[in-house]
Amino acid sequence: MSSKAHMLLTASALALTALLASCGVTSSPRATAATSADAVMTVLEPGALSDAQLEATYGGTLVTRTPTFALLTVSADAGVMTAQGSKTRIEKNRKVYRVSQGHGQTSVSGSGTVGLWGNGSVGVWGNGSVGVWGNGSVGVWGNGSVGVWGNGSVGVWGNGSVGVWGNGRYEPIPQNSDPWQQIALDDVQAGRRASGNGMTVAVIDTGVDLNHPALAGGFTEPSTWHDFVDGDATPQDEGELGHGLTGHGTEVAGIVAQVAPAAKLMPLRVLGADGSGDVASVAAAIVWAVDHGADVINLSLGSDQAMTAVSQAIAYANSQGVVVAAAAGNTGAEGIDYPAAEFAAQPMNVAVGSVDLHDVKSTFSQYGALELLAPGEAIYGPAPQERFAAWSGTSMSAPVVAGGLALALEGGATGAQAAAALTGTATSVNGVQGNAAYAGKLGAGRIDLNAALTSLGR
């Protein structure tokens, strides 16, 4: 079944462009503690020490643990920050991760209005303008659109329906037809070869609009959700669309849902509405996702430095068969953000950059130690308050790959096999005009879902 959202755009159109960027004992994450301390301590090989013994020994508050590491929040005072031995690492905690390093602000013209149709009423954005993003790292651009979902009945992604291609268009969001055909999603879905059925993708981000009609029926059980920012079980994408990074996680989840419509989404909130988050929250969310059944983890976030806790959490995920896709970052420079920068020698993890519709590296996309490229410019997805919006960034490219991994895993491939299928069949873009300066630094190339599934015998 399919249902189309209809929108009217008069004068200047509006787009939101986010430049981005085992079986042992585990502890339930303590989200409040994770976000209130200045520093974190990673204890390697905690052994048989109980939770209480760990806290007493190292003078911190336990956030999460696996058989290979334990994570505590600690005070940043001189006494605690003193070296604890070869098995501990003490690092900064607060606001280390973000969805963008920023390219400066872009304002939107205030002379136009946006009409929202489909439910018998027409609405506008205030006085015809949208506030500029507050931190200078995200701009509101005038080449896309924001609209609402028809009458709230767009629920095709989460219910296993795959027959969404008709007359060369992707029906839920026709504006995405070109990028989805670019990666051969039409061939995969039209032939009902894969939909992500039985797979779970954890979206570790700003949260998700849990009430959006486009995502109805597409979530895992609420017992698997968590908000590591507020310390509760409701990872809602908070704030107001058009301010900060509100809507980022909803968009990311919606992209996964378009690529793998039968996969289940596990919403985990680690970033505030400003798009920043703590080390403890990100690491704990990765462990949580693994322990609650995720097959794929999407990280449309990054840092300019490696953090031991997150590296250890990703290693734990891999040890349990979970594959990870992470965004490369959006400064346009050589060298990519962490944790993606560590993925080159890790066969179950994929660092993702962005290309345009002509396979030219996006100007904002970082490059270097990449594995894959995927469309990341003006990709449409659900937005809070029953809207849909277009965003740009490697944050959008990563969930394309995460969805592709879910498609590959559905047939019984391991995480390493799924990642190898996507990278091994990618279309090289080194010879594309406009990419000469980046030859050899764009990974295997642009993802091709048809070729990847064919390589897996599907």
Image (cartoon, grey):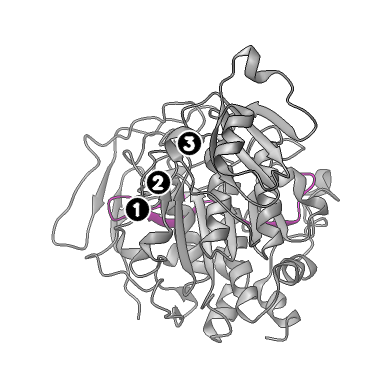
Q: Nearer the viewer, residue 456 or 450?
A: 456
Mark 1, mark 2: which one is toward the viewer?
Answer: 1
Q: Is residue 379 magenta?
A: yes
Figure quadrant of the C terminus: bottom right
Residue picked out by circle 3: 275
Can the viewer see residue 155? Answer: yes
Estimate the spatial distance between the alpha carbons at disc 1 and disc 3, rounded to whole Å. Answer: 15 Å
**Secondary structure beneath label 1:** loop
Q: In the image, residue 299 lies at what x, y percent?
A: 58, 49
* Res 23 → quadrant: bottom right
Q: Amino acid at mark 1?
A: Asp
Q: Is residue 427 left or right of residue 32?
A: right
Estimate the spatial distance between the alpha carbons at disc 2 and disc 3, rounded to whole Å. Answer: 10 Å
Q: Earlier in the sequence, mark 1 or mark 2?
A: 1
| Residues drawn in magenta | 367-390
Q: Are marks 2 and 3 in contact (CB under 8 Å)?
A: no
Q: In the image, residue 237 lies at what x, y percent?
A: 37, 46
Residue picked out by circle 1: 209
Q: Earlier in the sequence, mark 1 or mark 3?
A: 1
**Measuring 33% from the left and 71% from the top, which residue is drawn there?**
155
Q: Nearer the viewer, residue 67 or 211?
A: 67
Q: Are marks 1 and 2 in contact (CB under 8 Å)?
A: yes
**Secondary structure beneath label 2:** loop
